[in-house]
Image (cartoon, rainbow, N blue to C red):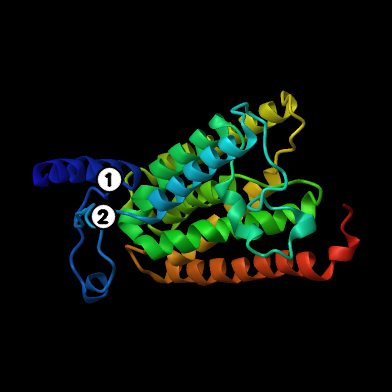
Amino acid sequence: MSHNRNLLSKYTNQYIRYLLPRQQHQKVPTTEHLQTDGTYEQQYYSIWPPPLVIPIISILQIIFFIVNIICTKSIRSGVVPWEEALIYSPQKRKEVWRYFTYSLAHIGYTHLIVNLVVQFLLGLPLEIVHKKWRVLVLYFAGILAGSLGSTIAHPNTYLYGASAGVYALLLAHIGTIIINWREMTLPGIQLGGFLSIILLDIILTIIAKDNSQHGVPIGYTAHIAGAIAGLLVGIYILKNFDPSTRTKIIFWTALLFYFIFMCILIYFNIFLSNTLKY
């Protein structure tokens, strides 16, 4: 068991270093440097105790998907119980749990599997490197922003799925590139890779919307809102491996913009609810 764990740790660290590359030169230790969270090239990330946030969320999503199949007696993509208590409905937004629990409900195998794969590939490295509570806050910041944003832009759209949280994880990786730019190997290529993934997903979303046979609207506004929250929260809350005046300015700027962004979303959801057309 110990040998298998060490082997898994080895490959996990190789993946993390590929996703969050270490710099190719060693720094001269300084007092400021010794007070940081550690640099990529010096840190060995243990998978024990194992990450829990992403696995638990994913297991819950699978359980609710199976329960949904049992309740509807159908496995056809597009079949969803609209009155199901987890799904976010703007008309029922006083039931505040819906702002978060919609992330546990998915429509069809493809919807679920894609989100699970991205959660594991992008979420687990973040959880191992930046610790559980940071990823938990980041993920649900994206989920909350997604439901708030969807209410404003698409007040007649039911919301389900973890795409807002997944986008938060995706953009958080861009945040780590920004704040740890000097700690990265070829950060420009890393940034271009993540932006390409986002562009590809946008294209596939548009194609899926045009070819949809079920008439189920896609809450793409939730994707955008979750992405914005993920970027801003990720910059502020994830570890900074190379503190500097530049990154401190970026930190506080991100926090300020996130505060403004959330205030706008909450304001429209609460005080302008009567102007929304349902």
Pinpoint residue 133: horizontal percent, then vertical percent: 40, 65
Q: Which residue is the extreme one toward the bottom?
A: 31
Label 1 SS = helix
Q: Whole-percent x and y of residue 135?
A: 43, 59
Vertical side of 207 occupied by 3: above or below = below
Q: Is residue 231 visible?
A: no
Whole-percent x, y for residue 81 in the image: 69, 41
Q: Residues within 10 Å of mark 2 (few under 14, many from 20)?
A: some
User: Considering the image in quadrants, where does the N terminus appear?
Assistant: top left
At 25% from the left and 43% from the top, the residue drawn is: 12
Foreground of the two, 138 or 72: 72
Q: Is residue 233 left or right of residue 217?
A: left
Q: Quadrant of residue 228?
A: bottom right
Q: How many marks?
A: 2
Whether pointer 2 and pointer 1 mark residues with C-beta atoms closer than 8 Å, the reply is yes
Name the residue located 36 percent from the left edge and 43 percent from the top edge: 186
Q: Amino acid at mark 2?
A: Tyr
Return the mark for residue 148.
none
For disc 1, the marked residue is 17
Q: Nearer the viewer, residue 243 or 200?
A: 200
Residue 40: mark in rendering: 2
Residue found at the very far left of the displayed protein: 3
